[in-house]
Image (cartoon, coloured by chain):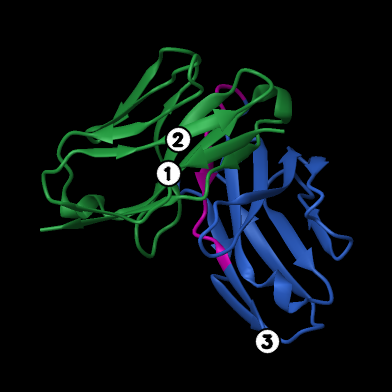
Chain colours: A green, B blue
């Protein structure tokens, strides 16, 4: 079945540092890939998405590129802010699988001033 | 568009009791999903509706769990004879009928079984 593996956390960075959170996936079909973010006390919300190989999703300074050859979708941001402190989830969904999503276990990011 | 709403936000119940949660999806979304999330884990799929039809159920969904979406709008998730292992955050999400099926999540219902 489908699966998503994220780098283990927690990750602690200083403000303005570069962020990478690794994500790799296994899927039998041709999934769409997502990053969701959960800020403290809030629900999950979509951060960015990519629907096919070599697509780059971007939002709020975050980027991730759909790499089919390495089955990866790593999240990057060039300069993190304290307000980026949250839990980040990598996920995939597959139209052949009812569109339900398979999630990684999440990576907690803390950004210190 | 007011987003996905869930009620109640918190529920504390004693083992053996029945509980019911409600989810109101984004009005134009045909697809509705239920997930369960425990501490330190990502959401795990429980069940999926397209309109009023329940099209898939996870093996995680034991016979004590039942979900409905009677008119293709709101959905309910009932847990009968709750067990301590049912303690978790129950998440509802909806998605558009076409496209990559990104999920729009509600705030969740946190269930504690004592």
Q: Residue at x 78, y 54 (%)?
A: B60
First in sequence: mark 2 or mark 1? 1
Q: Are marks 3 and 2 on the same chain?
A: no
Q: Nearer the viewer, mark 3 or mark 2?
A: 2
Residue behind mark 3: B114
Crowding at dot 2, Cα within 10 Å, few <14 / some 14-19 / many 20+, comes out as many
Quadrant for residue A99, please give it. top right
Q: Position of residue B91 (x, y in %)?
A: 59, 56
Q: Position of residue A17 (x, y in %)?
A: 14, 43
Mark 2 and mark 1 residues within 8 Å of each other at the beta carbon: yes
Q: Is residue A29 above or below residue B21?
A: above
Q: Residue at x 54, y 43 (%)?
A: B26
Residue behind mark 2: A23
As helix, strand or loop, the secondary structure at mark 1 comes to loop
Crowding at dot 1, Cα within 10 Å, few <14 / some 14-19 / many 20+, comes out as some
Q: Is residue B25 magenta?
A: no
Residue B29 visible? The answer is no
Q: Is residue A35 above or below residue A38?
A: above
Which residues, given as a range, are shown in magenta?
Answer: B98-109
Marked residue chain, label 3: B
Residue behind mark 1: A7
Going by the picture, which residue comes out furthest to the right? Answer: B63
Marked residue chain, label 1: A
Q: Is residue A53 left or right of residue A14?
A: right
């Amino acid at each position: 079945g489908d699966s998503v593996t994220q780098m283990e956390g927690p990750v602690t960075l200083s403000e303005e540092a570069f962020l990478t959170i690794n994500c790799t996936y296994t899927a039998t079909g041709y999934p769409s890939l997502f990053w969701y973010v959960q800020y403290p006390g809030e629900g999950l919300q979509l951060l960015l998405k990519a629907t096919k190989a070599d697509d780059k999703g971007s939002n709020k300074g975050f980027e991730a590129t759909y790499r089919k050859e390495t089955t990866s979708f790593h999240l990057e941001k060039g300069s993190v802010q304290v307000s980026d402190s949250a839990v980040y989830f990598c996920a995939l969904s597959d139209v052949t699988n009812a569109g339900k999503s398979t999630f990684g276990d999440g990576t907690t990011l803390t950004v210190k001033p | 568009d007011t987003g996905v709403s869930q009620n109640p936000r918190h529920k504390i119940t004693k083992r053996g009791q029945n509980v019911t949660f409600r989810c109101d999806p984004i009005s134009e979304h045909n697809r509705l999903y239920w997930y369960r999330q425990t501490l330190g884990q990502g959401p795990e799929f429980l069940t999926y509706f397209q309109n009023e039809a329940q099209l898939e159920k996870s093996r995680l969904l034991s016979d004590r769990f039942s979900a409905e979406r009677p008119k293709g709008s709101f959905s309910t998730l009932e847990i009968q004879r709750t067990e301590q292992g049912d303690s978790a955050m129950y998440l509802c999400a909806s998605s558009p009928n076409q496209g990559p099926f990104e999920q729009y999540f509600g705030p969740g219902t946190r269930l504690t079984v004592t």
